[in-house]
Image: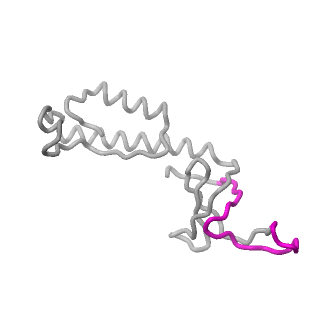
Amino acid sequence: IVGFCGETEQQHEDTLSLMREVVYDQAFMFKYSTRERTHAHRNYEDDVPEKVKSRRLSEVISTFYDESEKKNLSEIGKLHLVLVEGPSKKNQAELVGRSCNNKKIIFPSKALRDNQASSSSSRAHPSRGDYVLTRVTSSSAQ
């Protein structure tokens, strides 16, 4: 939450610095707003101007995505065991799943060799609940 009562520019800069150091995988980022019947509403003055809150929130969001993109780029070339969640919403020729570090991985839906089958030529398409070893070939900020 940016722009909480009394937040200084130095405190905001400290937040950005912490985000760059920790490199969070996910974040819920919001501007502070008063809510009636809360401790802050009864005891603090909402003294950070709305324009300042908006600027700070933009900086927090930008910092989060910049750092996330750098971290995700470092995954290119690495292998991940992915738990298949199902078809991609954007492209039915792709599947989506989660790696062991809870990163969303989108990969082509293609038949894989079935190691459980008696015939070595048997192939099966992965489906929800299957684990697939996937190499990361590209990344985005999310």
In the rendered image, residue 134 lying in the magenta stretch gets the answer yes
Left or right of 69 in this view: 51: left
Task: Give the farthest residue toward the top.
Answer: 10
Q: Nearer the viewer, residue 129 or 61?
A: 129
Question: Where the N terminus falls, by quadrant?
Answer: top left
Residue 101 x %, y %? 58, 47
Query: Height in image: 132 above or below 16?
Result: below
Q: Nearer the viewer, residue 117 or 96?
A: 117
Residue 98 x %, y %? 58, 56
Q: Residue at x 64, y 57 (%)?
A: 82
Start-end of magenta stretch: 115-137
In the rendered image, residue 118 lying in the magenta stretch gets the answer yes
- The mark total stands at 0
Residue 123 x %, y %? 78, 73
Residue 141 x %, y %? 50, 49
Q: Residue at x 52, y 45 (%)?
A: 69
Query: Height in image: 77 above or below 111?
Result: above
**Quarter assignment of residue 86:** bottom right
Q: Residue at x 25, y 27 (%)?
A: 8
**Quarter assignment of residue 132:** bottom right
Helix, strand or loop for the magenta stretch, by majority:
loop
Left or right of 31 in this view: 129: right
